[in-house]
Image (cartoon, rainbow, N blue to C red):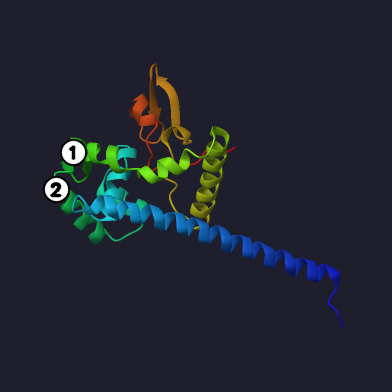
Amino acid sequence: MPAPRALVKKVLSRYNNCVKANHLFLLLERLGNLLRSKEREAGGSQGLQAIHLQVLSFLSSCNKYSNTPAGITEYFGITKGTISQTLNVLEKNKLITRSADKKDLRVVHVELTKKAVDLLKNEIPPAVFKEALSELNDIERKTLTNLLYKLLVALQHNNNGKTFGVCKTCRHFKANAFGRHHQCGLTNEKLFNNEASKICREHERMVS
C-alpha cells in the first residue's frame, strides 16, 4: 500500500533539510580548516602553534572581565592544563604579561605586549581571508556576518554555552550612565568607549 502523500512529503522535507545541513556543515568545516592551516603557517614562522595565535586574537578582542585564564578556558572550551601551557609559551616568547587584579589578588589578568599586537596586525586575519572577503560587496559582507552570528547564537543557546558577545549588546550595558562613559549593570563599574566594543564572558543577550 503506497504511503500517504503527506507522509512522503514530510520524509522528503526532512531529507532535504538534512542534505542542506550536511552541505553547510562541510562548507563551514572546510573554511575553518583553510583558516587554521594559514594560522599554523603564520605561527610556525614564529615558533608558535595555531592555538597560541587564537589565544592572542581572543585577548585582543576581550574585556577586563574576560582576559583571565578562566575566561580563556571558557571561550575555547579546552582544559585548564592546556591553557596554562599555552600561556607559559606566550609569556616565554614575551607576547603576554600577567598581573594580579587590583581588587581581587586571586584573579590574574593576561594582557598583550606590543610584540603580540604587532604580530596580530601582520598575521590575523590571514591575508588570504582579507583577499577573499574583498570579493564580496558591502551588503554581502553584512548579510554573511549577520547570518553567521545568528547561527553562532543558536549553537551557543542549544549547547548552554556563554555567548561572549560584545559588551554594548548586553542587557547589563547602561549607555552614558556616567556622562561620556558607560556602566556595567552587573558590576556597577564604569566602562570606557573602547571597552564597550570588547567581548565579555558575562554577556547576556538583550530580551526583545
User: Does residue 203 appear in this view?
Assistant: no
Q: Are marks 1 and 2 in contact (CB under 8 Å)?
A: yes
Q: Residue at x 43, y 37 (%)?
A: 166
The quadrant of the rendering that contains the C terminus is top right
The structure residue drawn at horizontal position 29% and vertical position 61%, both measured from the top left corner, is 79
Q: Residue at x 79, y 66 (%)?
A: 9
Marks 1 and 2, Cα distance to the nearest angstrom? 9 Å
Q: Nearer the viewer, residue 33 or 175?
A: 33
Residue closest to the far bottom = 1
Residue bearing the label numbered 1: 115
Q: Is residue 39 visible?
A: yes
Q: Is residue 121 left or right of residue 102?
A: right
Quadrant of the rendering where the N terminus is positioned: bottom right
Q: Where is residue 202? Give x, y as percent.
A: 39, 43
The kind of residue tagged 1 is: Lys
- Quadrant of residue 85 within the rendered picture: bottom left
163 or 208, which lies in front?
163
Query: Which residue sits at x=79%, y=71%?
Result: 8
Examine the rendered structure and indicate whether residue 155 appears above or below residue 114. Answer: below
Q: Position of residue 95 (x, y in %)?
A: 18, 43
| Label 2 crowd bin: few (<14), some (14–19), many (20+), radius 10 Å | some
Residue highlighted by disc 2: 93
- Front-lying residue, 66 or 179: 66
Q: Is the residue 149 above or below the residue 174 in the image?
A: below
- Which amino acid does the dot numbered 2 rest on? Asn
Secondary structure beneath dot 2 equals loop
Q: Position of residue 205 (x, y in %)?
A: 50, 41
Q: Is residue 33 left or right of residue 57?
A: right
Mark 1 crowd level (few <14, some 14–19, many ≥20, 10 Å Cα)? few
Give the secondary structure at mark 1.
helix
Please tell me whether residue 7 is drawn above or below residue 36 in the rendered image.
Answer: below
